[in-house]
Image: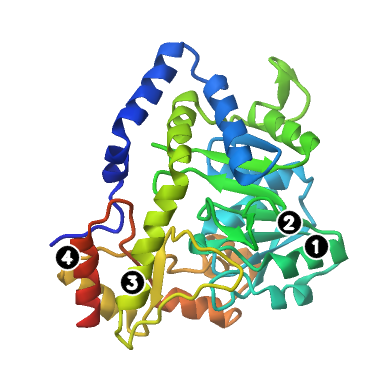
Amino acid sequence: MEINLAVLDRQFELHQTEYEQAALRALRSGWYVLGNEVENFEKEFAKYLGAKFCVGVNSGLDALTLAVRALNIGEGDEVIVQANTFIATVLAITENHATPIFVEPDEFYNIDAEKIESAITPKTKAIMVVHLYGQATNMKKICRLAEKYNLKIIEDCAQSHGAKFQNKMTGTFGIGCFSFYSTKNLGAFGDGGAVVTDDENFAEKIKMLRNYGSKIKYHNEIAGVNSRLDEIQAALLRVKLSHLDELNEERKKIAARYLNEIKNPSIILPKIREGSTHVWHQFVVRVKNRDDFQKYLEQNGIKTVIHYPIPPHLADCYKNLNHRRGDFPVAEKFADEVLSLPMFNAMTAEEIDFVIDVINKF
């Protein structure tokens, strides 16, 4: 049996007629950029999250980058971020010429809220939270710190569509930045992203930044970029959003089987924080002899991916930050041990059985 990490066409087939109708509706409209589909998706996604405003952009990275820029964070400023995230989170900071200040993750793979305060300096302007792998971060402590030190909260929600902390949606504690890359729980059929906020003025600024810095065509009030969610992707996202809760529930059921039935003592299973929900964008285990384990799974037809093998502070592009191996040992340990197992909608019971059986025999 061959099992991939993710099989996207099955999710399309679940609601194929709706997707095709939505795409044709957008195509037949004759309006393909910043039209009714984008406007309606923005309203629907904001309502789903319990937020006031949503602004569609080109990607999750653009969402983060424009959020930092709209907060006037730049050269000489610092942004606190966890050390075990995907490089895009950090790129959004450095693209605006600010400095990332790394903090170790906790046992749930999110930023360790207990270690943030010691990283705050007079230069700190924001805390960038990443709800990694689909589990909500400990936002109670972080919100208190942000209020105490007058800091902004930027949430990287690229993997947490529909996840909650204490019954409040991720993306609504600060400025929510979402990716709609195809593999995401709320994935488009290409690239896409959004910025979510309760601040109308901030939303208007993001709208200007995504469209060359203008409200009115050719009247460029600020220096912006071209970062617009297109009409066809917005139409398709509206379909998937209407099914997001059921898609997430299905992922939770797959995760429950993994958690309950993987019995191999060599495998460290993920934990769920009290008060948090997990939407299982990835099901990530840890194994000390990770490379041997991954090779074994490959030989048995099971595809896996390492999210992520190189923590950002050790990336070649950030040599200028002068970090060395050993600076963030928890993040580095995770990078050496984590492995993502197959997790996708419409995964069959037979496929789940096979993954569990092969892992238990390792």
**Is there a contact, CB below 8 Å, between mark 2 and mark 1?**
yes
Q: Earlier in the sequence, mark 2 or mark 4?
A: 2
- Report crowding for label 3: few under 14, some 14 to 19, many 20 or more residues within 10 A (C-alpha): many
Q: Which mark is residue 69?
A: none
The residue shown at (68%, 15%) is 217
Q: Where is residue 350 in the image (x, y as percent from the top left)?
A: 18, 62
Residue occupied by mark 3: 258
Q: Which of marks 2 and 1 is nearer the N terminus?
A: 1
Q: Position of residue 25 (x, y in %)?
A: 41, 18
Residue occupied by mark 2: 153
Of tags 4 and 3, the one toward the viewer is 3
Of tags 3 and 2, the one toward the viewer is 3
- Amino acid at circle 1: Ala
Residue occupied by mark 1: 146
* Apparent side of residue 254 relative to residue 79 in the rendered image (left or right): left
Q: Where is residue 63 in the image (x, y as percent from the top left)?
A: 61, 43
* Apparent side of residue 352 relative to residue 222 in the rendered image (left or right): left
- Amino acid at circle 4: Gly
Q: Earlier in the sequence, mark 1 or mark 4?
A: 1
Residue occupied by mark 4: 301
Q: Is mark 3 on a helix, strand or loop?
A: helix
Q: Distance between the residues labelled 2 and 1?
A: 7 Å
Q: Distance between the residues labelled 1 and 3?
A: 36 Å
Q: How far apart are marks 3 and 2 (CA)?
A: 33 Å
Q: What element carries label 1?
A: helix
Q: Where is residue 304 in the image (x, y as percent from the top left)?
A: 30, 65
